[in-house]
Amino acid sequence: LDATLLVMLLCFGGFHIHMVLYNETTIEGSSPHFDVGPRRNWEQVFGENPWLWFLPVWGKGPAGNGIHWPMNRLSDLRSGDEYCEDGLADSAKLLERISSSEGE
């Protein structure tokens, strides 16, 4: 029983660490637009202070305001794009664009 629980927790933990490092969610999955590198992805979730990463305390919070998020500059979206303002992508407009391109 203990070994089974250990295996399940290791798989669950590994899966979620992978998701954090690639800036993925269980709902949207992989999106190269918001993958800004493993370190910055990790900091978006756990904050910028490494001393607080594994403590259950509030750090500075994620980069972005809930609607606009840092985005990958190497993706096809650029600063002059209507979906991007000051290097932060408008999540709603970008997801609408992605879903419309998948439907084609």
Image (spheres, rainbow, N blue to C red):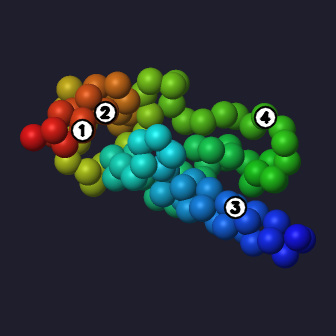
Q: Which mark is residue 6?
A: none
**Chain-order first, disc 4 or disc 3:** 3
**Chain-order first, disc 1 or disc 3:** 3
Per the image, the residue denoted by label 1 is 98
- Looking at the picture, how far across and down is residue 62, in whole percent? 60, 36
The image quarter in which residue 77 lies: top left
Q: CA distance from mark 3 to mark 2?
A: 27 Å
Crowd around label 1: few <14 · some 14–19 · many ≥20 (10 Å)? few
Amino acid type of the residue that numbered disc 1 sits on in the rendered structure: Ile
Q: Are marks 4 and 1 in contact (CB under 8 Å)?
A: no
**Left or right of residue 16: residue 100:** left
Q: Residue at x 16, y 38 (%)?
A: 103
Per the image, the residue denoted by label 3 is 13
Q: CA distance from mark 4 to mark 2?
A: 28 Å
Residue 84 seen in render: no
Q: Are marks 1 and 2 in contact (CB under 8 Å)?
A: yes
Q: Which mark is residue 95?
A: 2
Q: CA distance from mark 4 to mark 1?
A: 32 Å
Q: CA distance from mark 4 to mark 3?
A: 21 Å
The image quarter in which residue 50 lies: bottom right
Residue 71 seen in render: yes
Amino acid type of the residue that numbered disc 2 sits on in the rendered structure: Leu
**Left or right of residue 25: residue 30:** left
Which is more foreground, mark 4 or mark 3? 3
Q: Residue at x 50, y 45 (%)?
A: 25
Tag count: 4
The image quarter in which residue 70 lies: top left
Mark 4: secondary structure: loop
Q: Camera-side residue: 9 or 57?
A: 9
**Chain-order first, disc 4 or disc 1:** 4
**Chain-order first, disc 3 or disc 2:** 3
Q: Camera-side residue: 30 or 66?
A: 30
